[in-house]
């Protein structure tokens, strides 16, 4: 296949780009195009591309401006929510790690001291009423079962806090 360039090819291309073919074409240029294979191929290919473009433009539906604006705003808001959710995910992972650490510490503590979770009930006097002063923080550290009660309470608070953070972030 041999491609030969024509000296009038630029003139024909300009005529096609302006949309002057075939109405505003000079008769001698028209006779040249009929005789020159390079110029006739250029016209054939350019007209095919122009008709394909015109067909694609006519079938394309742009949609209303309001719908396009609404979609752009929705994408912007979703991106902002995703950016805001990254630190929340980090907080959730941190809360899970703290909860798992508390559970591990609690299990190790209970394994070393025996699983006597309710042994403090036996230490309470049976005939006397329960005094709630023993539940104050100062009384907890002076009694023998302070860590037995303190560690499960802290673990429960941490677990409830983690679940609350998770549920709040899921609703947003």
Image (cartoon, rainbow, N blue to C red):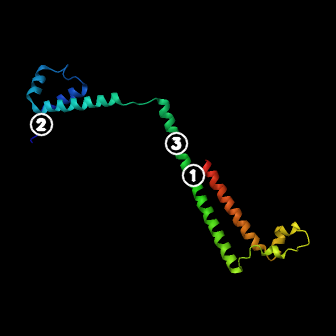
* Residue 5: assigned label: 2
* Residue at position x 85%, y 70% in the image: 134
Q: Secondary structure at mark 1?
A: helix
> Does residue 35 appear to the left or right of 92 in the view shown?
left
Residue situated in front as seen by the camera: 94 or 128: 128
* Residue at position x 33%, y 29% in the image: 57
Q: Secondary structure at mark 3?
A: helix
Badge 2: few (under 14), some or many (20 or more) residues near its Cα, within 10 Å?
A: few
* Residue at position x 47%, y 30% in the image: 65
Disc 2 from disc 1: Cα separation: 62 Å
Q: Are marks 2 and 1 in contact (CB under 8 Å)?
A: no
Q: Quadrant of residue 152?
A: bottom right
Q: Secondary structure at mark 2?
A: loop
Residue situated in front as seen by the camera: 89 or 151: 151
| First reached walking from the N terminus: tag 2 or tag 1 | 2
Badge 1: few (under 14), some or many (20 or more) residues near its Cα, within 10 Å?
A: some
* Residue at position x 80%, y 74% in the image: 120
């Amino acid at each position: 296949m041999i491609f030969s360039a024509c000296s009038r090819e630029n003139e024909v291309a300009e005529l096609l780009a302006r949309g002057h073919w075939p109405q505003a074409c000079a008769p001698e240029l028209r006779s040249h195009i009929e005789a020159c294979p390079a110029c006739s191929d250029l016209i054939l290919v350019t007209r095919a591309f122009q008709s394909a473009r015109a067909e694609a433009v006519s079938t394309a539906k742009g949609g209303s401006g309001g719908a396009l604006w609404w979609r752009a705003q929705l994408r912007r808001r979703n991106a902002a929510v995703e950016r805001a959710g990254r630190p929340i995910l980090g907080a959730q992972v941190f809360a899970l790690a703290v909860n798992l650490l508390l559970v591990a510490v609690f299990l190790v503590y209970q394994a070393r001291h025996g699983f006597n979770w309710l042994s403090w009930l036996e230490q309470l006097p049976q005939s006397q009423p329960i005094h709630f002063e023993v539940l104050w923080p100062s009384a907890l550290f002076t009694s023998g079962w302070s860590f037995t009660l303190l560690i499960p309470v802290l673990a429960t608070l941490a677990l409830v806090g983690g679940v609350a953070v998770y549920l709040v972030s899921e609703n947003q």
